[in-house]
Amino acid sequence: MKNSKIILPDLESLKADIREYLDNDMVNTVLILSDEVYSAACNDEEFMDSLMGADTLLASNTLMVRDIMKKNNGITVEVEGKEEDYSNFEYNSFDEVVAIFKELNATVYLLTQDEKEMEKCRILLKMDAPEINSWERCCEDIENSSDTILNEINGIAPDVLICSFDSPFQEKWIMANKDKMNTKMVLGIGPGVSKAKKNKPSAREYIRNLFKKKKS
């Protein structure tokens, strides 16, 4: 795998890219790669090709960044012609991307395949951006309901569609349907959300803190 295609933490460039994605006339795709998806893609050429069709690929978290470094036999990784030392860098790409959505007042549509994953996405999104304007849809039979889902998305026309399905179906579905969507950006997260949740407070803690804020 050519690691220059995986974007390691450069938050200013990431912010500029997403700002451009939300301002142009194309449907841009951003995929957050979990450790599992990254490993699977390294061993599946067809899956890798589908990933390479995205506009941006993001390492999901610190552990994945370090895994990429380990595979490259060192603490530095060459990214687009430059070297950076990420040995002590703490990073979670979902947090960073949602923070940008919040700053840009982007609207979001959440699409998942099951209620459990929807709950994770809902909690994580509201933790990072509690005031963000969002819609949601859980569709267990997304493969046979694409037209219905796409019609609903196109009627709402959100700035961002956040998808969380199993891989590799998720990535293939996004790339096959992105040109039919009335949205500015598609963010595929999949198993990366579960990784992000490990460093987050529990749902109970989040609700408790939310009520404290309302009372004060």
Image (tube, rainbow, N blue to C red):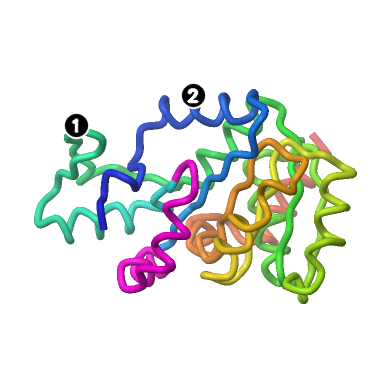
What is the number of the mark on residue 82? Answer: 1
In the image as oriented, which residue stretches furthest toward the left? 73
Q: Is residue 178 left or right of residue 32?
A: right
Find residue 102 and report its image quarter.
Answer: top right
Amino acid type shown at disc 2: Ala
- Residue 47: image location, x then y, percent: 43, 67
Q: Is residue 155 on the magenta stretch?
A: no
Residue at x-position 67% and y-position 28%? 25
Q: Is residue 89 left or right of residue 76?
A: right
Helix or strand or loop: what does disc 1 sit on?
strand
In the depicted structure, whether residue 153 falls above or below residue 28: below
In the depicted structure, whether residue 172 falls above or below residue 89: below
Of residues 78 and 43, the one drawn nearer to the viewer in this rendering: 43
Q: Which residue is mark 2?
A: 16
Image: magenta residue range: 35-56
Separation of disc 1 and disc 2 at Cα? 18 Å
- Residue neighbourhood size for the residue with mark 2, other residues' Cα within 10 Å, grouped as few (<14), some (14–19), many (≥20): few
- Residue 64: image location, x then y, percent: 33, 57
Give the mark nearer the N terminus: 1 vs 2: 2
Residue at x-position 73% and y-position 36%? 159
